[in-house]
Image: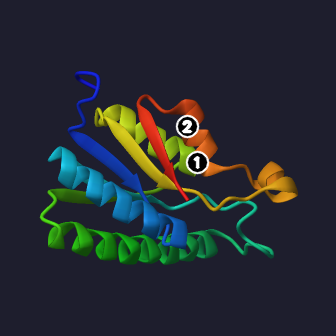
Amino acid sequence: MNNPGTVRQILLSIDGSDHAKRATQVAIGLASSYKAGIVIISVVSPPGLYISGPVGGPADLADYYQIGTEGAKSAIASAMALAKSAGVDARSKVIQPAASVVEGIVDYASSEKIDLIVVGTRGLGGFKKMLLGSVSSGVVANSPCSVLVVR
């Protein structure tokens, strides 16, 4: 952040979930209040625990990323339309491949000198949180700037 309390660039990371939709509303409101720009990103998560069943080879992986990218573009298009209707200066990017969703968000925020990251949380708890990890807590732990997590 250039000066403490100054927010010029907000990074909104979305995945199409209901929590991401709420985070979108909050980020757009903040961008409007601060007269800040907003970058809306979606990171296509790498395969791993997310793929159920055997992977047949490179064609399956290409299909996986194609489907993920199409979903990301759709979620971004909705968020961009909301930003535009609010008069907020917005740009977007689909990030893939990335070693992890957290790394994709944090690396982008670092390279673009983002002042604030806004993410939603799914509120995973117990065994699922331990098994899958939490994007929002990973971003909070590794971010180069402040992070707002929206429920």
Q: Is residue 94 left or right of residue 67?
A: left
Residue depicted at x 43% and y 28%:
144
Residue depicted at x 31% and y 37%:
114
- Give the Cα separation between the discs numbered 2 and 1: 6 Å
Q: Which residue in the structure is indicated by mark 1? A: 136
Which quadrant would residue 84 be assigned to in this image? Answer: bottom left
Residue 13, horizontal then vertical, whole percent: 43, 55
Quadrant into which the N terminus falls: top left
Q: Using the rendered image of the protein, determine whether residue 85 is visible from the camera's viewpoint.
A: yes
Q: Which residue in the structure is indicated by mark 2? A: 140
Mark 2 touches mark 1? (CB < 8 Å):
yes
Question: Which residue appears farthest toward the front when viewing the image?
Answer: 33
Residue depicted at x 81% and y 59%:
128
Residue depicted at x 68% and y 70%:
57
Q: How is the image coloured?
A: rainbow
Q: Please state which amino acid type lies under the numbered disc 1.
A: Ser
Neighbourhood count class around disc 2 (C-alpha, 10 Å): few under 14, some 14–19, many 20 upward? some
Residue 109, horizontal then vertical, whole percent: 37, 38
Question: Which residue appears farthest toward the top when viewing the image?
Answer: 3
